[in-house]
Image (cartoon, rainbow, N blue to C red):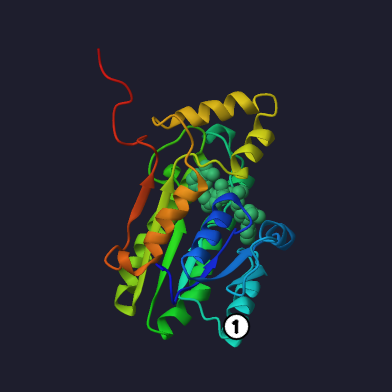
Amino acid sequence: MRLNGKTCLVTGAAGGIGSALTKLFLSQGAQVIATDLDLAALETKFADAKTDTLHLRALDITDPTAIAALNDSLEAENLPINVLVNNAAAIRIGALLDASPEDLDLVYRVNMRGTMMMMQGFMPGMIARGGGTILNMASLAGVHAMYERFAYGASKAAIVMMTRSVAVDYVAKGIRANCICAARVETPFIRSYLTEYYPDEVEERFEALSKYQPTGRMITADEVAQMAVYLCAEESAMVNGQAFTIDGGVTAGDRAPAT
Ligand SMILES: NC(=O)c1ccc[n+]([C@@H]2O[C@H](COP(=O)([O-])OP(=O)(O)OC[C@H]3O[C@@H](n4cnc5c(N)ncnc54)[C@H](O)[C@@H]3O)[C@@H](O)[C@H]2O)c1
């Protein structure tokens, strides 16, 4: 199995991508510490997936005290991690003139600061044990300007550069870091923001988001999880500091043949 010997911590594991990723990592032989702000949601999500290689923990990635306590308790339980998947995030929709300071504060606090604190919390232990792998869930919005993603896109662009920065600074200590930049992935994230921002247009907007990918549909959470397995397994040992796009061809070039 591709993740034998890996102990992986996943944030936002109650969500669409985080739960798909957790299940696929377990099937590939990893021990998984699945964490989320919402422990009850985690317990519901994994009620049928109980195995002694799955460990559910509450964790708010914006809370440095909780991060330190989880690190200490995992070490005490003999579950030191060697793979960290920073997947939890907050989203705000809107262009520059729609964005409030609070929108920027939220994506900064959860997406940027949270990701930074997770890496600061868990990387020293990885380095002390000889190295490890970091995978950050960025977004296509972090490398390609998507409509009405001003604050969110800025936070994801920061995650891309934090990833590259860590890759450069810590490669000699055995750390490699990569990120995934997905277009629209069919998860509760999509319907929840459509319901919040466009309550009267959820279905038409959902359809338009599906067609945004030239392949005509959204990406599945499992398809993102497959990419994540590769980036966390030994087979990608020479891949470091990269942003992997999964977008059905959005950024490849033209959308339709010229007549
Ligand atoms: N769904 C998409 O179209 C899409 C596209 C590109 C990138 N992404 C990224 O993929 C990741 C997962 O997205 P998803 O679609 O599965 O979202 P989701 O909303 O289904 O799941 C996100 C999870 O993060 C948790 N969370 C939020 N704030 C947290 C915090 N402070 N501490 C700990 N957990 C917290 C939530 O409780 C939730 O379970 C995110 O980083 C998102 O930006 C999603």
Q: Is residue 238 visible?
A: yes
Q: Quadrant of residue 249?
A: top left
Query: Residue 190 appears at what percent x and percent y?
Result: 59, 39
Front-most of residues 118 and 29: 29
Query: Residue 11 appears at what percent x and percent y?
Result: 57, 62
Quarter of the figure that contains the C terminus? top left
Q: Is 22 above or below relative to 120? A: above
Query: Residue 167 appears at what percent x and percent y?
Result: 34, 66
Q: Residue at x 31, y 21 (%)?
A: 256
Query: Residue 165 appears at what percent x and percent y?
Result: 35, 64
Q: Residue at x 61, y 85 (%)?
A: 77
Q: Residue at x 40, y 65 (%)?
A: 232
Q: Is residue 21 left or right of residue 167?
A: right
Q: Is residue 106 visible?
A: no
Front-most of residues 215 and 182: 215
Residue count near mark 1 (Cα–Cα under 10 Å), binned few <14, some 14–19, many ≥20: some
Q: Is 174 above or below relative to 247? A: below
Quarter of the figure that contains the N terminus? bottom left
Q: Quadrant of residue 3?
A: bottom left
Question: Residue flagged by tag 1: what amino acid is it?
Answer: Asp
Front-most of residues 165 and 47: 47
Q: Quadrant of residue 196?
A: top right
Q: Is residue 218 left or right of residue 34?
A: left
